Image (tube, grey):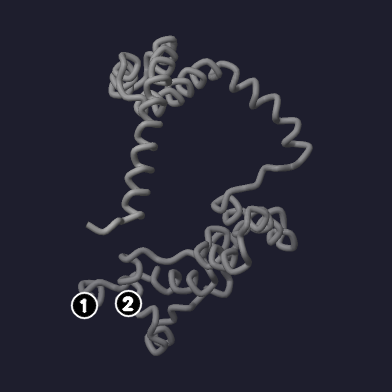
Amino acid sequence: MAYKPKKVLKDTFASVLTSGLEAIEEEALPIASEELKKIELPPDMPEFYKEQLKKAAGGGKFIQAAALLPYAIGAVLGLALAPVAPFAEWAGMPLRRLLDTYRLDPASVTRLWLRGFPDEDRKEEWWDDLRAQGWSDDRVNAAKELAHFLPSPADAIAFLAHEVFEPEMIEKYGLDSEFEALDLTLPRKIGMTDEMSLNYWRNHWTHASWMQIVE
């Protein structure tokens, strides 16, 4: 049989690795198990994890004990630190105020922009909150596009039924009558473009019923 140095090296390495792991497990398993036994598990910990931790503490596999030990410590520390969490939050407030770290979320920025707050000249400044969080100008423009109101499916069908997009019928029935006199401030604040407001205005006229026509 031909000598295969690669196979010999592979087998030797595997043998050394296995022996090393067995030695580590033999020495470390009792330590990890003892540490797990010292930890008082929180009462609200899921039963599944409690059972796994008890098995590991009772002399299971080293890998199991080593993996579960940090979880158990984290759960206990979380329970222990919970009462002081509000105080830590309160203590950090002056620093956050000093550094001005808070930024508004996209929904809040969009609503403020639509409402023109605090005024039309400064409403664009709200988008800087999102740029500070990594938003590019393309994404800001996309958010502005999504802010604009679109009709519901039922209204979209009603537009078609009520000649909203038919210039001849609009002219014939005067569907644009009185629109120029409307104050569109409120529709704009909820995301309606002037064009969309006009569509709804054309749609709001009520068709006469057959009986009304006959009479």
Residue 208 pos. (x, y %): 29, 73
In the image, 179 versus 131, the foreground residue is: 131
Q: Quadrant of residue 47?
A: top left
Q: In this view, does 93 lie to the left or right of 43?
A: right
For the point 65% across and 23% down, which residue is it?
A: 88
**Quadrant of the snapshot with the C terminus:** bottom left
Q: Earlier in the sequence, mark 1 or mark 2?
A: 2
Q: In which quarter of the image is residue 128?
A: bottom right
Q: In this view, does 43 lie to the left or right of 98?
A: left
> Nearer the viewer's eye, disc 1 or disc 2?
2
- Which residue corresponds to mark 2? 160
The single residue placed furthest to the right in the displayed view is 98
- Which residue corresponds to mark 1? 214
Q: In which quarter of the image is residue 199?
A: bottom left
In the image, 174 versus 194, the foreground residue is: 194
Amino acid bearing label 2: Leu
Mark 2 secondary-structure assignment: helix
Q: Distance between the residues labelled 1 and 2?
A: 25 Å
- Residue 99 lies, with reference to residue 194, above or below; the image says above
The single residue placed furthest to the bottom in the displayed view is 168
- Residue 149 lies, with reference to residue 9, above or below; the image says below
Residue 207 pos. (x, y %): 31, 73
Mark 1 secondary-structure assignment: helix
For the point 56% across and 16% down, which residue is it?
A: 83
**Quadrant of the snapshot with the N terminus:** bottom left
Q: How crowded is mark 2: few (under 14 residues within 10 Å), some or many (20 or more)?
A: few
Residue 32 pos. (x, y %): 42, 18
In the image, 191 versus 164, the foreground residue is: 191
For the point 71% across and 53% down, which residue is it?
A: 118
Amino acid bearing label 1: Val
Q: Residues within 10 Å of mark 1 (few under 14, many from 20)?
A: few
Q: In this view, does 157 lie to the left or right of 125?
A: left
